[in-house]
Amino acid sequence: MPTPKLTAADVGAPRLAGTTTQNANRLEITAGGEDIWGTRDEFHFAHFPVAGDFSLTTRVESLVMADVYTKAGIMFRASLAAGAPHALLLAFGDNQPRNNNNGGLEFQSRLQPDAACTGIYPPQPLPALPDFPASFPNVWLRLQRTGNSFTGRYSQDGVQWKTFCTAELALPAGGLLGFAVTSHNPTRSVQAVFTAWDFSGQP
């Protein structure tokens, strides 16, 4: 399937504007923003329209942190509204513990406009290397949708995959799919590089 043409936008009017540079299937995203969480989001989003089932895979080659909760990942979003429903499979910049999370990955969603987000945190051991580590440049993410079933997968080589989670989410059939990055520090921008991304209209 041809590489989709991406549209770049800041969501939630972050104090520092973001940018997207696309060269074939390599993306360099600079982003500000307070967070993707709670009842509203601030981040930079490089996206394209989708309807129905999909599968999107990417390698997160690098992520520069401005906060322990700096995030980069694959998002399906109902709209560009700050409080829009969404599903997001994300990587943090490292593997330090965060609230309920002991690894480098997380899956989060918001089901209703302007409602609170929820996260999924598979049990992961400490202090051993977690089952889903952020080990750049070897962080591969895949977000798939079949009906209302959303599955997040992870790989360290793009060949062998492990399922992070599957969630049943009543999200709209049509929306925006792409790459989301937030600084979580409204006074500092961060940079993320996505490479080797591949989109299919069917999982």
Image (cartoon, grey):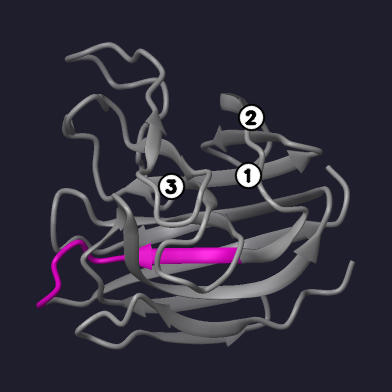
Magenta region: which residues?
178-187
Residue 51's x, y, as percent? 82, 60
- Of the residues shown, which amino acid type is indicated by label 2? Trp
Secondary structure, mark 2, is: loop
From the viewer's perspective, is residue 71 above or below residue 45? above
Secondary structure, mark 3, is: strand
Q: Is residue 131 magenta?
A: no
Q: Residue at x 48, y 56 (%)?
A: 113
Secondary structure, mark 1, is: strand
Which residue is under mark 2? 161
Which comes sooner in the sequence, label 3 or label 1? 3
Task: Using residue 80 as the reference point, say whether residue 98 is left or right of it.
Answer: left
Which of the image's four quarters has the C terminus?
Answer: top right
Which residue is under mark 1? 142
What's the distance in space between the residues labelled 2 and 1, CA to CA? 9 Å
Q: Are marks 2 and 1 in contact (CB under 8 Å)?
A: yes
What's the distance in space between the residues labelled 3 and 1, CA to CA? 10 Å
Mark in front: 2 vs 3? 3
Q: Residue at x 77, y 65 (%)?
A: 50
Figure quadrant of residue 32: bottom left
Which residue is under mark 3? 90
- Of the residues shown, which amino acid type is indicated by label 3? Leu
Task: Using residue 8 as the reference point, say whether residue 33 is left or right of it.
Answer: left
Front-most of 35 and 172? Answer: 172
Q: Residue at x 32, y 21 (%)?
A: 130
From the viewer's perspective, is residue 138 above or below residue 132? below
Q: Could you say which disc has been placed on residue 5 in the image? A: none
Residue 5's x, y, as percent? 72, 83
Q: Residue at x 32, y 76 (%)?
A: 31
From the viewer's perspective, is residue 171 above or below residue 114? above
Figure quadrant of residue 75: bottom right
From the viewer's perspective, is residue 128 above or below residue 173? above
